[in-house]
Image (cartoon, rainbow, N blue to C red):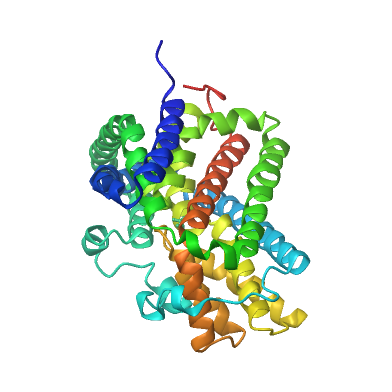
């Protein structure tokens, strides 16, 4: 009897945990296995995103349809991210995880280890690539997406004899990339095993005691969003059973959890949303790549909760208007965060400085948060991509672009 792939992956994950716990540091030799899996996924991201967006946008047809799709997509991103932020805000105020916390300074990771984030306006300006080939070479997702959307739209405007050559060609490339992605996903059980071992080795467990309440607060918040809010949104808009959607997305969820990267997970997310949930490439190519970089509900919740936590540790009382600033900048920071591990933590500096929290104590607390970030990052990445996938189905449903729903492989 052949076990379904997502069960194989889950078992591999459990074995990875056992392996890392039994062998401890010695289990590090397995690291290359996880790294190879990540490199394989990264290898397909740029060509997959390029070809899928160009062929997807070209099939949307005209500017009016594109505009409607864009509006729906952006509204969904903003709405769900805001909901996540409000959950974070409420929980930190209720639980107060930062009150009376004593940060053991020696254990926190130095501030210098973190790259400073770009300013928010820079991030938006850089969406327009000055060189699309450079954007592709550097894996600059927003630049690639911008160019691909514009190029796809233009393909519908060129004379028929050119469009008739280019569109099927790019469509064929896209299908070849999806096929390749399918083969790479088959390796997920081995890759996930290696990644989980790496993740456990990279986590500063000894700090868990000091900041345990903070970690629990974030975990509760993410769980509410993941298991209640998003499934309810899914049900309201599609009238379908959300449990089936969890099953359809299982491979992507586990990959997000073990890689802590929405971008690296993107090929798997696309495969699940198209092959299992039955969403057309027209919709998924529009919603998912952009979602992987812009729509980060888990990260948004984290930005808000993290900043309020830091304020509590420092004994700073944030006024209602300051909390409102946190809400808005947390939203922007989650949009600007890249889909890579710990990007959310780096962006937290933007939110912190918006309410005047700066200096060595802040840096030390963030350093501590970095040391324990891995498990939280794994969970918020999973929530991030789940929200993208719910968005894809909700929008596809509203556009009648969903074929065979609930086909669980
Ligand atoms: N790792 C997250 C992601 O790729 C971003 C974050 O650090 O919150 O989605």
Q: Nearer the viewer, residue 244 or 30?
A: 30
Q: Nearer the viewer, residue 379 or 390?
A: 379
Q: Residue furthest top?
A: 1
Q: Quadrant of the N terminus?
A: top left
Q: Could you tell me residue 142's position as x and y percent? A: 38, 61
> What residue sits 66% from the left and 50% below the top?
225
Q: Nearer the viewer, residue 275 or 50?
A: 275
Question: Is 324 situated above or below 74?
Answer: below
Q: Is residue 285 left or right of residue 136?
A: right
Q: Nearer the viewer, residue 338 or 395?
A: 338
Q: Is residue 161 left or right of residue 18?
A: left
Q: Could you tell me residue 229's position as x and y percent? A: 70, 47
> What residue sits 54% from the left and 60% below the top?
299
Using the rendered image of the protein, determine whether residue 59 is visible from the camera's viewpoint: no
Res 52 quadrant in image: top left
Q: Could you tell me residue 313's position as x and y percent? A: 64, 78
Q: Is residue 53 left or right of residue 390?
A: left
Q: How many marks?
A: 0
Q: Could you tell me residue 58's position as x and y percent? A: 38, 43
Question: Is 316 situated above or below 153?
Answer: below
> What residue sits 53% from the left and 85% below the top?
361
Q: Is residue 290 left or right of residue 351?
A: left
Using the rendered image of the protein, determine whether residue 299 is visible from the camera's viewpoint: yes
């Amino acid at each position: 009897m052949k076990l379904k792939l997502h069960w194989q992956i889950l078992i591999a994950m459990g074995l990875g945990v056992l392996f890392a716990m039994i062998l401890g540091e010695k289990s590090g030799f397995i690291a290359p296995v996880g790294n190879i899996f990540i490199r394989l996924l990264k290898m397909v991201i740029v060509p997959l995103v390029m070809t899928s967006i160009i062929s997807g946008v070209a099939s949307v047809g005209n500017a009016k349809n594109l505009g409607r799709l864009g509006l729906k997509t952006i509204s969904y991103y903003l709405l769900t991210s805001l909901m996540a932020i409000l959950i974070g805000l409420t929980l930190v105020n209720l639980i107060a995880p930062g009150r009376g916390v004593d940060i053991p300074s020696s254990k926190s990771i130095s501030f210098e280890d973190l790259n400073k984030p770009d300013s928010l306006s820079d991030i938006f300006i850089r969406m327009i690539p000055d060189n699309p080939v450079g954007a592709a070479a550097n894996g600059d997702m927003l630049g690639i997406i911008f160019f691909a959307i514009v190029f796809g739209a233009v393909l519908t405007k060129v004379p028929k004899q050119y469009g008739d050559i280019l569109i099927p060609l790019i469509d064929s490339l896209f299908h070849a990339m999806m096929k390749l992605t399918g083969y790479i996903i088959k390796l997920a059980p081995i890759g996930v095993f290696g990644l989980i071992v790496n993740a456990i080795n990279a986590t500063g467990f000894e700090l868990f005691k000091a900041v345990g309440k903070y970690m629990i607060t974030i975990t509760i918040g993410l769980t509410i969003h993941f298991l209640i809010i998003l499934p309810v949104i899914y049900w309201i808009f599609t009238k379908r059973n959300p449990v089936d959607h969890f099953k359809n997305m299982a491979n992507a969820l586990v990959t997000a959890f073990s890689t802590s990267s929405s971008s690296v997970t993107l090929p798997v997310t696309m495969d699940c949303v198209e092959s299992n949930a039955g969403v057309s490439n027209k919709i998924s190519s529009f919603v998912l790549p952009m979602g992987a970089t812009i729509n980060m509900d888990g990260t948004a919740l984290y930005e808000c909760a993290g900043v309020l936590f830091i304020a509590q540790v420092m004994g700073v009382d944030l006024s209602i208007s300051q909390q409102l600033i946190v809400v808005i900048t947390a939203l922007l920071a989650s949009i600007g965060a890249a889909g890579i591990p710990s990007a959310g933590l780096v962006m937290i500096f933007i939110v912190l400085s918006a309410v005047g929290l700066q200096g060595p104590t802040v840096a030390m607390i963030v350093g501590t948060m970095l040391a324990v970030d891995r498990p939280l990052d794994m969970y918020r990445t999973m929530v991030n991509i789940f929200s993208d996938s719910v968005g894809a189905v909700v929008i596809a449903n509203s556009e009648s672009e969903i074929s065979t729903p609930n086909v669980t492989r």
